[in-house]
Amino acid sequence: MKLSLSYDPTLDAWTFTHEDCHLRTLGDVRQWEERARALLEQIPIGGVLLVDIEGFSLAPEMGPEWAALLKTLVLPRIGVLLRYGHCERATESAIQIQGLVNRIPAGILPDRSAALTALMRLRARPA
């Protein structure tokens, strides 16, 4: 499991990527939490986070554990969260179900270009 975080000053946004990240067991979720926490703490409160979900899979039964982490680890510090990329149908469903159940962002855009377009539209909205 490899997670990485990079900042693009031109976009004023952070990108979080996954490689060979398969959350199938509680141990996998805890390992993701440990690695993600170390990276995500770098993002200032209210930051923009683009999440590339290529290389990420979530077993439906781990959805509640993962959603709880999202609510406590990610959402309190992120102002905008946009996911993009292709994932397994089961992962997409688990993300969407947990989004509905836990009232957390659940959308997945098809690619980075779509995520950047969405970000520009969000920024263009009147305050």
Image (spheres, rainbow, N blue to C red):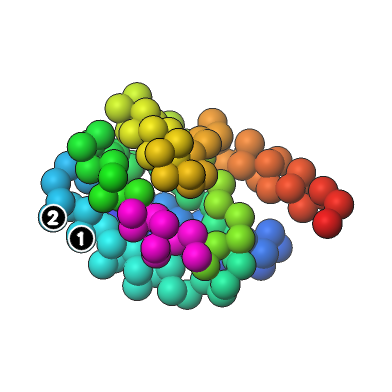
Residue type of the residue flagged with mark 1 = Gln
Picture quarter containing residue 47? bottom right
Picture quarter containing residue 3? bottom left
Residue type of the residue flagged with mark 2 = Gly
> Which range of residues does the magenta coloring cover?
68-76
Residue 16 visible, this angle: yes
Is 69 within the magenta? yes
Callout 2: SS: helix
Q: Is residue 89 left or right of residue 9?
A: left
Q: Outermost residue, right direction?
A: 126
Residue depicted at 34% across the width and 34% down the height: 94
Q: Dot 1 corresponds to which residue? A: 31
Q: Position of residue 116 (x, y in %)?
A: 66, 45
Q: Nearer the viewer, residue 14 or 69?
A: 69
Q: Position of residue 96 (x, y in %)?
A: 43, 33
Q: Nearer the viewer, residue 52 or 23?
A: 23
CA separation in Å, label 2 and label 1:
6 Å
Q: Is residue 60 left or right of residue 105?
A: left
How many discs mark residues in the rendered view?
2
Q: Position of residue 46 (x, y in %)?
A: 61, 67
Residue depicted at 48% across the width and 44% down the height: 103
Quarter of the figure that contains the C terminus: bottom right
Q: Is residue 28 left or right of residue 63?
A: left
Q: Dot 2 corresponds to which residue? A: 27
Residue depicted at 28% across the width and 62% down the height: 33
Callout 1: SS: helix
Q: Which mark is residue 90?
A: none
Residue depicted at 20% across the width and 60% down the height: 31
